[in-house]
Image: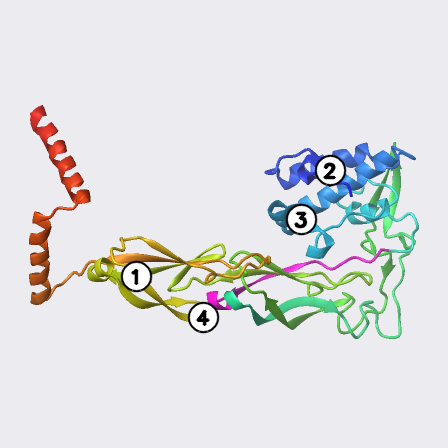
Amino acid sequence: MATKRDFYEVLGVSKSASDDEIKRAYRKLAGKYHPDRNPGDATAITAFKEAAEAFDVLSNQEKRARYDRFGHAGVENGMGGAGGFQDVGDIFEAFGDMFGDIFGGARRGGGGPRARKGESLQTSLTIELLDAAVGCTRELHIDKHVSCVTCNGTGAKPGTQPVKCDYCDGRGQVIQSQGFFRVQTTCPSCRGRGTTIRDKCADCRGHRVVSRTSQLEVKVPAGIDNGMQLCVRGEGEAGESGGPPGDLYVDIRVKSHPLFKRDGVNLMCDVPITFAQAALGTEMDIPILTGKHHITVPPGTQPGEVFRLKSQGMPDPHGGSRGDLLVQFHVEVPKKLNKKQEELLRQLAEVDDKQVSPQRKTFFDSLKTFFSKDEDAE
């Protein structure tokens, strides 16, 4: 299977290109490789389809964001992407109106508009970190347009049907010849549908769709992270001319947790201990996702030292290994001392003055050297 070229490379634009730059680049390539200009040239047809697929992704903010993050895998049919065009008729249908209808033959067979998939919708969902760790199911209420059940999406009064548009003879396009190209514009009477409605449906008033609030359950997989996106198939806007509904994209937001901080699949937890516990060692319970975990803090634990608990972090939503829990100890210095504590600490300080540790001696030796340089300079 041939490897697809980078879409930015196909259009000859940078990854920071604006929408206008992408549109101009595609328009130029579409004119160069247009089938009417290259009759019987299979290579030109392939290039024409390749440019159209690149434009289909990069001109759509949602698809472009997924492509920038995941590459071609993010925009394949399995993730709600383009998946390529089967024939040039699909390209004419998709982009014929977008550039002032410079393309000829968008509806060479006539017969009115082709089925179109509905527009995608986007919403957000906020969950707790513990819910993200085990996965959960949440209920969403989405306002969207659905096909009118009274008229079955025709827009016409029950018992009647839309009739062929007299202005464009049902083609949906008005075609004129201008030099090399055939220029076609959307029919101003039927707005490209090829049909008009004489007796409108009382419920949708001829719009074919009605507004509804849809209630649905969304399954959130374990390990999902803040900023990830779920795709719910078929829960977007209603399609046109019998086309399937669009999709719903759910942006996930994971709340911050009072005890755990997340770093990918790993979790971090700051645990305070006293000077005595750090110096002498201790045993204590620390929090983990499933409750608590008993650990032994060894004597001589240093401030900021990190202990790793294997497989106590977050699951990998992509099927990889579970993360770890990184426990960092912070030595707390009391702000107020009772009389007994102060007495004991003063005794310890006297011992420290007589038995200076190598690390402390190095610091004070450096300090004396620093001050002596200032005195010599005077």
* Label 3 – label 2 distance at C-alpha: 13 Å
Q: Which residue is mark 1?
A: 297
Q: Can you tell which of label 4 and label 3 is closer to the viewer?
A: 4
Element class at badge 4: loop
Q: Which residue is mark 3?
A: 60
Q: Can you tell which of label 4 and label 2 is closer to the viewer?
A: 4
Q: Can you tell which of label 1 and label 3 is closer to the viewer?
A: 1
Q: Does 128 lie within the magenta span?
A: yes
Q: Does 143 lie within the magenta span?
A: no
Q: Earlier in the sequence, mark 4 or mark 2?
A: 2
Task: Please tell me how crowded label 1 is: few (under 14), some (14-19), or many (20+) other residues with Cα within 10 Å.
Answer: some
* Label 4 – label 1 distance at C-alpha: 21 Å
Q: Which residue is mark 2?
A: 26
The amino acid on which the numbered mark 4 sits, given as a three-letter code, is: Thr
- Indicate left or right for 130 with 284 as reference: right
* Label 1 – label 3 distance at C-alpha: 54 Å
- Indicate left or right for 71 with 360 as reference: right
The amino acid on which the numbered mark 1 sits, given as a three-letter code, is: Val
- Indicate left or right for 153 with 7 as reference: right
Q: Can you tell which of label 1 and label 2 is closer to the viewer?
A: 1
Residue 98 % position (x, y): 75, 45
* Label 4 – label 2 distance at C-alpha: 53 Å
Q: Earlier in the sequence, mark 4 or mark 1?
A: 4
Q: Which residues are magenta?
A: 113-132
Task: Please tell me how crowded label 3 is: few (under 14), some (14-19), or many (20+) other residues with Cα within 10 Å.
Answer: few
- The residue closer to the viewer here, 165 or 8, is 8
Residue drawn at x 59%, y 70% as measured from the top left: 140
Relative to 358, is 191 above or below? Answer: below
